[in-house]
Image: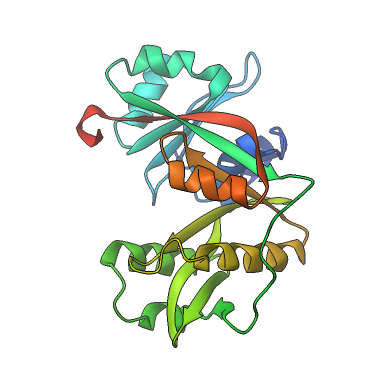
Amino acid sequence: MLGSSSLLQRLAAAIPDVPKWLETRSLLLSDDCELFGLDERAGINFIARDPEASDAYVVGWPAPEAIVEAASVSKEVIAQFDNQGPVVAALPHWNKESATLHVLGGSPRLPAERGDVVRLLTRKEVASIAGLPSELRSELEVAARWSPVAATVVDGRPVSFCYAGSETESLWDISIDTLEGYRRRGFAALCVAYMISHMRAVGKEPVWGAYESNDASLGLAAKLGFEAVDRLVVFQPPTSA
């Protein structure tokens, strides 16, 4: 069911604003959220689903049938590391992979800001960038509806992009992408540093999430001074493996 604004706001307020709940709370705060299996008899238990992205987030220990129902219309089901048990039981044939969450440590190693090569793009500019892969174009156009989109510009061409994939009162999730041919040249780091500065100006700190199999993302996070603080478990249907 689509949750009412007041219900979604109440559920968001009951969950702490910490990295492991960033995506879940961002979805609840957006008011564009489907709820499955809400049960408040013993704590708060439910699944929150993003109708656009088709991702579902497990809170507490919802009933198995609610997990199966949400999974039937979702591309991914995301659980906390300590409440993955009900999902494993409800979706025994789904693949799962851990993702590590990081925050910027006490000794960050961000590159100096380069306002001469990194800037925010307007929604019109995002829509008019030439030569983008179709999936990335769609991703950026959706992101530009609610988040600033920063880009590193090389020879007049935006080549690396950073935006807030999710956002709460005090946190934002780093989403980055760099075009083929421009990777491993420091352009992503410049873009991330710019966005961190921009978001700190409005009181929000970055969270870096990466699959444990994504050595490149984990390596860049460590290089920039991010430190692991938590883990999530992402479940995907067998056909997506």
Q: Nearer the viewer, residue 107 or 74?
A: 107
| Camera-nearest residue between 118 and 45 | 118
Q: Residue 235 vs residue 93: left or right?
A: right
Residue at 65% across, 80% down: 115
Classify residue 71 as left or right of residue 59.
left
Q: Is residue 156 above or below residue 135?
A: below
Residue 24, percent from left and from top: 56, 39
At x 57%, y 18%, the residue is 82
Residue 104 vs 40, above or below: the answer is below
Above/below status of 122 relative to 78: below
Q: Residue furthest left?
A: 239
The N terminus lies in which quarter of the figure? top left
Who is closer to the viewer here, 43 or 145?
A: 145
Residue 100 lies, with reference to residue 142, above or below; the image says: above
Horizontal and vertical percent position of residue 4? 56, 44
Quadrant where the C terminus sits is top left
Q: Position of residue 182 (x, y in %)?
A: 40, 69
Residue drawn at 44 percent across, 88 percent down: 156
Q: Is residue 3 visible?
A: no
